[in-house]
Image (cartoon, helix red, strand yellow):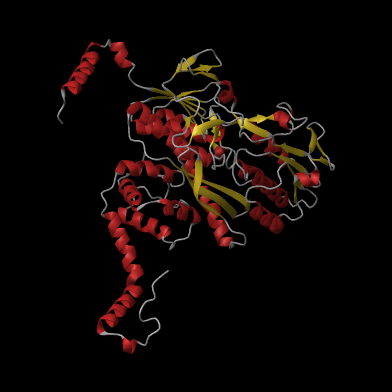
Amino acid sequence: MMKPVRGWTEPVSDFNDKEVLKLLLCGSLFLTGPVLMASDEAAEILAIEADSEYGEYLAGECSTCHNPNASDDSTVPKIHGASRESIVDNLLAYKNGERDNTTMKGVAEKFSKEEIAALAVYLASIQPDKT
Amino acid sequence: MKLNRRQFNALLATGAATAIAPLPLMGQAKPKVVVIGGGAGGATAARYLAKDGKGEIDVTLIENSKTYTTCFYSNLYFGGFRSFESITHSYDTLASDFGVKVVHGYASEIDRNGKNVKMQDGSSIPYDRVVVAPGIDLQYDSVPGYSEEAAELAPHAWQAGSQSTLLKNQLDALTDGQNVVMVAPPNPYRCPPGPYERASMMAHLIKAKGFKNSRVTILDVKPKFSKQGLFTEGWEEHYADIIEWLPPEIHGGIVSVDAKAGLVETDLDTFEGAVLNVIPAMKAGAIASRSGLTDDSGYCPVDGASMRSRIDNNVFVIGDACVAGAMPKSGFSANSQAKVAAMNVRGDLLSSKVFPARFANTCWSLISTDNGVKVGAQYSANEKGEIVADAKFISAAGESAELRKTTYEESIGWYDSITADMFG
């Protein structure tokens, strides 16, 4: 059970200054929170020292649908050779439910931050040709 | 690094042994892997072993056929959405670009004590590790009256190639008022949604020809089937007067098939079809049981953490022939399992890193033009080595036409990618 929080039932006029400040901070965090959190999460992942060899193994799963040598008009986008930032952003978007392809949601939900980092490092290192 | 005396001596001994080893012995140092079967499992395993082995593994792929027609997407050939050529692939790139030795011949048995694969022509191919990917064999006698000979009249078309062209030619020759009768297989079998996608494609063809009096009757031996809600919805919308699905509680059981007369007798009634598509029960490809790799189920038990046979440590079994827990028998599954097996084979032979097994599968089905649906999941191995599903998804009933089109288009991209992943 959550402890009752002061302020839920009491008029704001009863709050002391410290409490008002806290509430204001919470409000501003609530408004800007999701944006901040998404980019924070991406930054955190990009800062991870990633294992490219692990990324190579994980990327094996991607190649079943994402052809490293796909043409630009392929119905499944090319991800080999994409930037680390774009791979991290897109995987997070699926993981966080901002993009809704059910296949990719299932794939992304299973990845840990370390795994996303490893994948991004490996995929970004690929020069699409014969892999 | 600081060595103690014991380690130093061991190192010295290794060095000395290498120095005095006769040259031919040193030449044999390259480990040998033989892959049996060049489908979604075998071709992928061979390619990943060669690619990731970086020339340090001698990879041989044994496949009877010179070209490979994928069973997946062959239903779209029946519906007129793909040509036969577009689903047929060559092994040339595996040989030329990846250095895989492709041997076209029939592997009859694995001599597991002698560690070599016996070929039908009397030759044998030695291995350090063997990857077994023979796919399925059909149990013709599971349907009374059906046989390999009868399949030349009433095709199963569940192994793609000449059987596919036979069925396609029969479908194309159909005239208005003539019917198609399909006998659907019992579980477990290759491609769970396959029979129902096929019925959809047959009905699409009948509708496209403008026929008013032809039917597709599915005589199922199962009370329910994969993606049933989605297929039923699609059939009601597009093929209400064409497709009829009869479960065993209605037809009462298949009594016999007469391929010559085009008749399927059930407890309820006798069904007549100008085209009979009889899909019998299945089991692992013959070499698996001949080599003692199967259990009572007719399939090969494996440790899902590695795809290693539970019967022989030097053997890996992937694809339709293995018991893969929650994973369905599909080309996608086989391709996914192949990568786990290849990594573990490299770990065995080159001491390369082995990561925890992870698998994926998606089965797309086309119901009508631009109306694609899918079902899939992510998988991993539990502590008992069983493959379990972690995250599942399935298309929803009543989805928008736009989403269904996107799903179908996604399957086209997948087809191009998985075949590139298999054949290079």
Total numbered badges shown on the rendered structure: 0
Judge whether residue A93 can be spotted in this image.
yes
Relative to A14, residue A47 above or below: above
Q: Nearer the viewer, residue B334 or A79?
A: B334
Judge whether residue B178 can be spotted in this image.
no
Rendering coords of residue B95 (x, y %) = 42, 28
Relative to B219, B97 lies left or right:
left
Residue at x 46%, y 51% (from the top left corner): A76
Q: Please identify the quarter of the rendering in which residue A130 is found.
A: top left
Q: Nearer the viewer, residue B146 or A9?
A: A9
Relative to B226, residue B262 above or below: above
Residue reaching furthest to the bottom? A13
Q: Please identify the quarter of the rendering in which residue B70 is found.
A: top right
The quadrant the C terminus of chain A occupies is top left
The quadrant the N terminus of chain A occupies is bottom left
Rendering coords of residue B416 (x, y %) = 49, 44
Residue at x 37%, y 30% (from the top left corner): B346
